[in-house]
Amino acid sequence: MDRAQKEKVVEELGQIFESSGVVVVAHYAGITVAQMQSLRAEMRKVGGSVRVAKNKLAKIALEGKPAAKMADLLTGMTVMAYSEDPVAAAKVADEYAKKNDKFVILGGAMGDTLLDPAGVKAVAQMPSREELIASIVSCIGAPASNIAGAIGAPASNIAGILSTIEDKAAA
């Protein structure tokens, strides 16, 4: 890899560290190509991505970034999983680590907050952005449906009473 290619990789990694909601770092020694492709596919489904880069270049890219404290995690064969959604990459990485013992989560970063493996697991257990939006929408929609039910109830009660009176008058 020549100098221009290295500079391009450092620039790409810098963009990843700045724009990602979460970056998870893990060891992947012993994982097959098929297993890595499976991880990449799972990550793509949630809008995330997986990147393998030289640790030295990643450390250079981290300089001056909010996640700079994460540089100590970059030793050995490391892979970075990241996503804009602060929860998505952590969820996928945590689930994948449960299925594959060769994928070992070292930690990560959420903005300028350094995460240890327990921190990544805690982030993974949080609801995703879509789940939060759905719960907010259901909370907003519930009062409206209650109001509609309350408005419609007197009319149905009156209709029931009129029906009963009509039945008595016909008999």
Image (cartoon, rainbow, N blue to C red):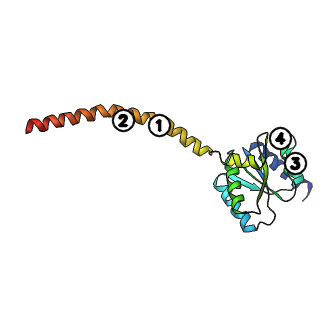
Give whichever of discs 2 and 3 has the lower sequence position: 3
Spot occupied by residue 55 in the image (x, y as percentages of width and height): 87, 54
Identify the image quadrant of residue 168.
Answer: top left
The earlier-in-sequence mark between 4 and 2 is 4
Q: How many marks?
A: 4
Gap between marks 1 and 2, in whole Å?
12 Å
Rate crowding at label 2 as few (under 14), some (14 to 19) or many (20 or more) other CA atoms within 10 Å: few
Q: Tell me, for residue 141, which label it has, or none.
A: 1
Image check: 109 left or right of 75?
left
Of the image marks 3 and 4, the number of the one nearer the N terminus: 4
In the image, what residue type sits under mark 4?
Lys
Q: Which residue is mark 3?
A: 72
Q: Residue 54 appears at what percent x and percent y?
A: 86, 56
* Mark 4, residue position: 65
**Do tag 2 and tag 3 residues touch (Cβ < 8 Å)?**
no
Q: Which residue is mark 2?
A: 149
Which kind of residue does numbered mark 2 sit on?
A: Gly
Cα–Cα gap, marks 3 and 1: 47 Å
Closer to us: mark 4 or mark 2?
2
**The C terminus lies in quadrant:** top left
Q: Residue at x 26, y 34 (%)?
A: 157
Q: CA distance from mark 3 to mark 4?
A: 14 Å
